[in-house]
Amino acid sequence: MLTVSLPDGSTREYSESTTPGQIAAEIGPGLARAAMAAAVDDTIVGLDFVIDDGQSVALRILTKKDPAALGVMRHSAAHIMARAIMKLFPGVQLAFGPTIENGFYYDFDLEHALSEEDFEAIEAEMKTIIKADEVFERIETTRTAALEIVGDLAQEYKVEHITEGLADHDQLSFYRQGEFIDLCRGPHIPSAGAVGAFKLLSVAGAYWKGDSSNKQLQRVYATAFFNKEDLAEHLVLIEEAKRRDHRTLGKQLNLFTISPLVGPGLILWQPKGAIIRSTLENFIRDELQNRGYQPVYTPNIGKIDLYEKSGHYPYYKDSMFAPMKMEDGNEYILKPMNCPHHIMIYKANPRSYRELPLRLAEFGTVYRNEQSGELNGMTRVRGFTQDDAHIFCTADQVPAEFMGCIEMTQYVLKSLGLDNYRVRLGLRDPQSDKYVGSSKLWDHAEKSLIEVCQTLGIEAECEAGEAAFYGPKADFVLTDCLGREWQLGTVQLDYNLPSAERFALEYVGTDNLSHIPVMIHRAPLGSMERFIGMLIEHYAGAFPLWLAPEQVRVLIVSEKFEEYGRQVAQQLKAAGLRVGTDYRAEKIGAKIRDAQLELIPYMLILGGREMESGQVAIRDRIDGDLGAVPIAEAIAKLQTEIDDRVVRQSFSGSAGFVAKGSQNEY
RNA sequence: GCCAGCGUAGCUCAAUUGGCAGAGCAGCUGAUUUGUAAUCAGCAGGUCAAGGGUUCGAGUCCCUUCGCUGGCUCCA
C-alpha cells in the first residue's frame, strides 16, 4: 500500500508504485499539463520519479508558479544549451552545468573560443530545440553501464566524474533529449517546450573542478524563465545594476578616479568623494569615542621582521608588495594589516587587567598586491583604508566586547539606511586540528557569539569550518536595494597573535600572575573604499543629505540676483551646510536640470520675489518645488534632516542578484 | 595569475572592402537676463592606449606591452 498526501489535506492510496506524473493526470488534465516537477517529502523530483509501494509520502505537484520549478527548468535549459553548442561546434567536451541563483551555466571544453558573437547562433539553435518540444527521458543505469555510455560518447570529464566524484554511487542516471544524452542526477521538466524565455549572458573561463592547476574550460552563463515578461523584468534589473555601477557613477559625479599612471587598484579620492568619506569617518570617530576606543596612528610601512613575527609574511608573501631593501640591510614592507602595529603599541607598556579591555582604533591604510584580474573599481583594490580597531581583553570580557562590536555595526548601518543584513558566524570545523587556542576557549567564544546574536535579534547563521585558524569570526553580509549581497564588516577573535609563539602579549591579572589577553579584530565597514563603492550603488549616487558632497545649491533666476545669491550662500555656509552656487547666464531650467543630474539634494531658487521678501524657494531633488520660505526656515529644515541622518530614497526591488562581493579583507 | 572581449576628444559614441579622424554633451569666448529638467552663435579640443610589423596607404590586419570589462583562481 502506498499512501500519498496532497497539499490540500486529501490523501490517495495506491496498491502499487506510481509517479507524480500519473497522480497529476488523475487529479486533472489541467494539472497534468501545468506540472513541471514534483516535491516528494520536500525532495524535488521529476514527474517520472517512481514512488515506491509500501510507504507514506507527502506530494506536491510543482507548476510554473513554484520557484522550485524554475530551478528544474533552468537545469533543463542548461542541457538544451549544451545540446545546441554540441550541434554547432565539433568535439565539445561537457563538464558541469548547474543551476545558479539567477540562471545557469555550463562548462565546456572545445577548440573554438566561444565569444558573444556566437550567442545568436546558439540561441537560434536552442529555440529550434525548444520548439521541437522533445521529452527529457530519464535513464537509470549501473555504474558499469554508465562508464560504458560516457566512454562511447568520448566524454572525458564525465568519465573522470563517475570514477572520482561519484565513486560511491552504484546507480547512476542519464537524461536523454533527442540525440543529446548527459550524465545527470536530474530532475528535469517533462519536455523542452516549457522553457518560455531564455538568454545567453556571458562567456568566461573557469577551471575544471574550480582548481587553477586544472585545465581552463569555457563557461557560458545564461538565464531562463517560464515567460518572456519575467525575463524582461530580470534584464531590466541587470540594466538597473549597470546604471548604478559605482565605477560609472564615480566618474560621472567626480567622486573618485583611478589612474593607470598612479597604478591599478589605487583609488584617488576626488574632493566630492573625499567629503563623503571624511563625513563617514567623522561619524565613526565620534561613535568610537563614545564606546571607549582610543585613537592611535601607525606608519604605512614596517620592518619585514614585524611581519615575519606575526606570521603574515611567510604566508601572504605573494599578495604583498615586495619588500624595500635599504642600504643598512633592513627590509621594509608596505603594511598589509594594522594589527602588528597596534600590538606593538600594546606591548609598549606593561599592562594590568585594570586597563582591559584596551581598544585601539585607527583608520589604517593597508596595501595588498591583489592579482591583476581581481581588481574592480573601489570594491577590490590594492590600497585601502580599514575602519580598524583591535581590542585586547580577557577571555571573560569577550562576550561583552563582541556585543559592543555588533551593536556599533548595527548602529552605523542603520544610520545609513542599511537594514537588510545578516551575520555569518564562522566556527571551527570539528574534524580539524589546525586551530590555535584551547578548545575550552573556542567553546566559550563560539557560544557567546551565538548568544550575542540571539540577544540582539540578529539573523545569524553558523558555518562550521569557516573560522580562521586563529579564531572564530562574525561577518556582516549586507543585501543592498537590488538584492545583491556585499560582505562588509567583520569581527574576529584572535588567539594566535597574542600567543607566546607570536607576540607573547601579557597582562597582570588580579592574581598578580601574567596572562595572555584575547585579541579582537573588528571593522564595522570593512574598507572605506569597498563600503563607499557599495553605498554609491545602493543609493545610485544620490546620497542622503548628511553625506551629500554638495547638500544645497543656490540658483539665481537671472544675474540680477547674484548679490542676493551670495548673501544666501554665505548664510548657508555659516550654518555649516555644504553649498554650491550657479550664477551662470543660463535659464533657470538649465541650472535646475544640471543640479538635478548632479543629484544635489536641495536647490534654493532666487528671483525678484524671493529677494524682496528675504525668502528662498526650495526645490527638492525628489519632490520638486516646495515653495518659498524665509532663509532661516530653509536652513532649519535642512539641518534637521542632516542631524537625523534621514535616508529619503533608495530604490527597493528584489533583483535577487548573486552574492558577488568577495570575502572580507582580514 | 588564467580564459575571453574591449581600448577613438574630459564624457557618451560614429568612421563602408584598409583610402582626408567625426558628432553630441562638457570646456572656453561672445550675445542673451531668463521663474522650476537643456537660449543662441563662435572657438578650441586627438601620438586613434603604447611600441613594433604587413601595406602605395593602417583607427581598421598581425605581434608585443599596458590598461579596462566579464568570469575563474586567490583573499590576512
Image: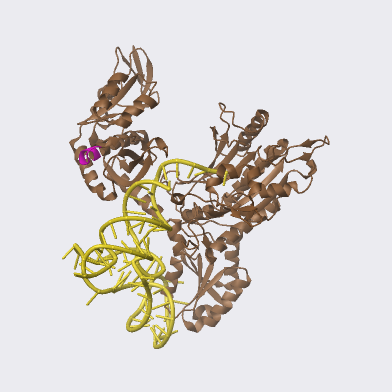
Chain B colour in the picture: yellow
Along the horizontal axis of the image, is A202 left or right of A136?
right
Along the horizontal axis of the image, is A407 left or right of A379?
right
User: Residue A102 location, x and y as percent?
Assistant: 37, 42
Q: Decide whether residue A31 is among the magenta residues.
A: no
Along the horizontal axis of the image, is A217 left or right of A410?
left
Q: Which coloring applies here?
A: by chain
Q: Residue furthest right?
A: A512
Image vertical order of residue A623 relative to residue A385, above or below = below
Image vertical order of residue A200 relative to residue B54, above or below = above
Point 43% across, 56% down: residue: A244
Quadrant that contains the C terminus of chain A: top right
Point 69% across, 45% down: residue: A391
- Of residues A141 and A241, the one nearer the viewer is A141
User: Residue A576 location, x and y as percent?
Assistant: 62, 68
Segment colored magenta: A85-91
Chain A colour in the picture: brown
User: Residue A557 location, x and y as percent?
Assistant: 46, 78
Point 24% across, 40% down: residue: A85
- Of residues A89 and A632, the one nearer the viewer is A89
